[in-house]
Every structure is written in structure tokens, then in C-alpha cells.
């Protein structure tokens, strides 16, 4: 499978099985209820298109989007780890401005399987 469109659902946590689709080039996750992306997404080496708008993720600033899918993925993972640890390292992302959503991205309350029970 090279393309998977999961847009406009109620997905709170991306199943790890999606991260084992190593030929995946396009992944649509827009308009769900995701708050974080799994670390295992780094296994998707062929991924060139990743749509995540319309979730509870911090939107990657335009200067990061222009750097490509991998930079967007790295940004999302760093924000996730920052939410969990309380320390966020956004150095080397070539940001032009402080992302306005970052002060609002406290660690969410752990939800049950119906929502989020882990990142």
C-alpha cells in the first residue's frame, strides 16, 4: 500500500500497524482528534505527504512545512516529547517566529481506549 486516507474520522490514536506500512508514501490524517503522532512513524521512510491539519496537534509553521514531510514529522515528535517531559527543544528548525499554539500544548489528561491512553 502506498497511500492511506484516514481523513475525517474520529481517530484519537494512530494504530501502530499503520507504521509498519513501509511502502506508504501518502498518509491522510486530517480532521481527526489526534493529539500526538507515534514515534514509530519514523519507520515510514517512503512517506512524502503527511496531512495532519484539523487535529489537536500543534500545526507546523509554514517555514517547517516548506522543509518537507520529514521536518514536519520531526516537529510533531519534538512537540510531543516536550509535552511529556516539560522541556521542548525547537532549535535547528529555522523558525521565523514563536509558534503561537505552543503555550496551549500542555500534556493532555490520559484518556482511556476510547481516546488516548498513551502516546
Image (cartoon, rainbow, N blue to C red):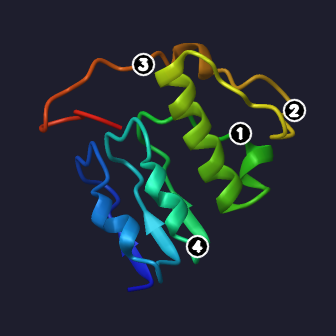
| Residue at 56% in and 42% down | 77
- Please tell me whether residue 9 is drawn above or below residue 61 in the rendered image: below
N-terminal label among 1 and 3: 1
- Please tell me whether residue 42 is drawn above or below residue 108 in the rendered image: below
Circle 4 sits on which residue? 45
| Residue at 40% in and 56% down | 29
Q: Quadrant of residue 19?
A: bottom left
Circle 3 sits on which residue? 107
N-terminal label among 1 and 2: 1
Circle 1 sits on which residue? 61
User: Do tag 1 and tag 2 residues touch (Cβ < 8 Å)?
Assistant: yes
N-terminal label among 3 and 2: 2
Q: Position of residue 118 (x, y in %)?
A: 29, 35
Circle 2 sits on which residue? 96
Q: CA distance from mark 4 to mark 3?
A: 28 Å
N-terminal label among 2 and 4: 4
| Residue at 20% in and 26% down | 111
Amino acid at each position: 500500500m502506498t497511500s492511506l486516507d484516514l481523513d475525517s474520522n474520529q481517530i484519537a490514536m494512530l494504530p501502530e500497524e499503520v507504521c509498519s506500512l513501509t511502502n506508504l508514501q501518502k498518509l491522510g490524517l486530517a480532521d481527526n482528534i489526534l493529539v500526538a503522532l507515534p514515534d514509530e512513524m519514523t519507520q515510514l521512510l517512503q512517506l512524502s505527504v503527511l496531512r495532519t491539519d484539523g487535529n489537536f496537534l500543534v500545526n507546523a509553521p509554514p517555514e517547517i512545512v516548506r522543509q518537507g514531510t520529514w521536518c514536519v514529522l520531526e516537529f510533531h515528535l519534538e512537540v510531543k516529547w516536550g509535552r511529556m517531559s516539560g522541556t521542548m527543544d525547537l532549535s535547528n528548525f529555522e523558525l521565523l517566529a514563536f509558534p503561537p499554539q505552543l503555550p496551549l500544548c500542555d500534556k493532555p489528561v490520559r484518556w482511556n481506549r476510547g481516546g488516548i491512553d498513551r502516546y
